[in-house]
């Protein structure tokens, strides 16, 4: 497998699902830029995940608040959200996806996982629960029963055709997803769940490759905001020792909005038409330096309760033994306007192709800066794997630039000693993995949890839970 190749799940039709042991999940994601519903299904024998159907909407197109509705939050770029408007957007997106796939939600759909990256307008990580409830309303309005959104407590609660694939009679769900424990204090970042799902999704995507992407890992999701984790190689469960927060896709979005190529208020880099641009374009190196003088990549200090507009709790991170790394533009997004002005300069110099090429270089360097910080904290093991997903890191030439230029502090090329994995829709694949974990549907012959090169964790989990320590 080429190291810079983006892994995309193979597709599968509903007719095939009904012939084999498949576990089908809908991932419903409300993001700052896009709202998605992705239908994925896992072969319960091989652990490979397939994609059935996908619907993507622009979150900016959510209907405006109506009279009497309470605005409970805003996207990173100021789009107002109410519980009712979010519910309608989610319900319509989910219903459209199910109908287009011709999937029977009662017979074929086993589980629905909800997640959000919209955190900018909340005062603390805890308040994100409000928007998660709005997502639940949308799923209920689409006809999804509550039992398909919560973990089963016994095998008898699962459909008869998949009861033989659960381990619920021997183990229970204790909070570990793909054998990784969340930080002991989950109030570290507002989008902690995204970090968990992305990490699980990268592990799931690796089942269709020759990479053993098990702990220890470093995972990053470059959506509009940044999410992800660093884990150690504990057995049977790995501890989360690093967490990410702040801006990701918002940085190229700011460059795009200032370029004159997209709407200056609600536009994003996705609105710039893609082209078969050359691998290399002549660019002024000062543009990259100017961008990175504005972009801040650092440990989050105890005095900061937001980083890149995302609510954070550095004290909770320290208490949990977790290093919290943030990416920002200026202080809490104050530098986004400077990036917009730079976007105009670049666009005027060479149009959309040059702007996209510069964005690729800027984003790749952000990964380098993050890696340097994580390594300086002593969190990189000799067998740590790196996984990247999200629209702002797998597009364009970014995977190639990262693969060819990402270095450890001693100058060693990352890929000469460590694996790197680029994955499309990592969060949705994580929903499939998390849903299986919540219902104890692991595969001992094709384990996703545990350490790289090691055995399945099931036997050790049983011992741990019987001893009362699980």
Image (cartoon, rainbow, N blue to C red):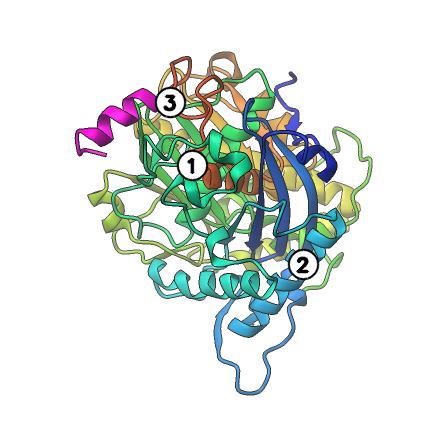
Say whether residue 91 is visible. Answer: yes
| Residue sitting nearer the eye, 294 or 384 | 384
Res. 258 in view: no
Image location (x, y in percent) of residue 9? 65, 31
Residue at image mark 3: 450
Could you tell me which residue is drawn at 32 percent across and 50 percent down? 188
Q: Which mark is residue 264?
A: none
As drawn, the residue found furthest toward the right would be 276
- Depth check, mark 3 against mark 1: the one in front is 1
Dot 3 or dot 1, earlier in sequence: 1
Q: Are marks 2 and 1 in contact (CB under 8 Å)?
A: no
Secondary structure of the residue carrying numbered label 2: helix
- Is residue 258 placed above or below 278 in the rendered structure? below
Residue 362 relative to residue 101: left or right: left
Residue 466 is covered by the magenta coloring? yes
The disc label shown at residue 95, or none: 2
- Under circle 3, the secondary element is loop
Q: Given contact means CB atoms under 8 Å apart, are the residues at marks 3 and 1 in contact? A: no
Magenta segment = 457-470
């Amino acid at each position: 497998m080429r190291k810079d190749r983006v892994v995309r799940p193979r597709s599968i039709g509903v007719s095939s699902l009904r012939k084999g042991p498949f576990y089908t999940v809908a991932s419903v994601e409300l993001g700052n830029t896009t709202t998605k519903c992705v239908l994925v299904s896992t072969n319960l024998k091989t652990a490979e995940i397939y994609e059935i159907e996908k619907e993507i909407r622009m979150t900016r197109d959510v209907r405006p608040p109506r009279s009497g509705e309470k605005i409970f939050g805003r996207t990173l770029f100021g789009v107002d959200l109410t519980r009712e408007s979010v519910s309608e957007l989610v319900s319509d997106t989910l219903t459209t996806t199910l109908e287009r796939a011709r999937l029977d939600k009662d017979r074929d759909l086993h589980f629905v996982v909800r997640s959000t990256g919209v955190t900018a307008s909340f005062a603390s990580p805890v308040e994100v629960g409000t928007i998660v409830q709005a997502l639940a309303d949308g799923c209920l309005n689409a006809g999804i029963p509550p039992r398909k959104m919560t973990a089963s407590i016994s095998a008898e609660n699962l459909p008869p055709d998949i009861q033989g694939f659960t381990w619920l009679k021997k183990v229970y769900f204790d909070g570990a997803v793909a054998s990784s424990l969340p930080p002991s204090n989950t109030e570290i970042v507002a989008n902690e769940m995204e970090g968990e799902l992305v990490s699980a999704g990268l592990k799931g995507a690796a089942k269709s490759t020759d990479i053993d992407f098990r702990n220890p890992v470093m995972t990053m999701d470059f959506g509009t905001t940044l999410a992800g984790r660093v884990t150690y190689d504990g057995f049977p469960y790995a501890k989360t020792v690093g967490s990410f927060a702040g801006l990701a896709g918002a940085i190229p979005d700011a460059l795009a909005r200032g370029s004159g190529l997209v709407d200056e208020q609600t536009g994003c880099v996705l609105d710039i038409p893609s082209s078969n641009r050359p691998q290399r374009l002549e660019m002024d190196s000062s543009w990259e330096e100017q961008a990175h003088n504005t972009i801040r990549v650092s440990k989050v200090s105890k005095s900061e309760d937001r980083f890149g507009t995302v609510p954070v709790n550095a004290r909770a991170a320290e208490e949990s033994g977790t290093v919290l790394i943030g990416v920002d533009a200026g202080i809490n997004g104050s530098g986004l306007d400077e990036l917009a002005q730079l976007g105009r300069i670049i666009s005027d110099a060479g149009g959309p192709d040059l702007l996209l090429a510069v964005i690729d270089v800027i984003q790749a360097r952000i990964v380098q800066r993050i890696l340097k910080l994580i390594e300086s904290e002593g969190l990189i093991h000799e067998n740590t794997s790196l996984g990247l997903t999200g629209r702002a890191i797998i597009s364009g030439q970014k995977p190639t630039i990262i693969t060819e230029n990402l270095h450890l502090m001693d100058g060693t090329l990352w890929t000469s000693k460590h694996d790197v994995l680029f994955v499309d829709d990592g969060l949705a694949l994580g929903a499939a993995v998390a849903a299986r974990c919540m219902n104890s549907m692991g595969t001992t012959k094709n384990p996703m949890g545990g350490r790289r090169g090691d055995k399945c964790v099931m036997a050790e989990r049983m011992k741990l839970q019987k001893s009362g320590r699980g």
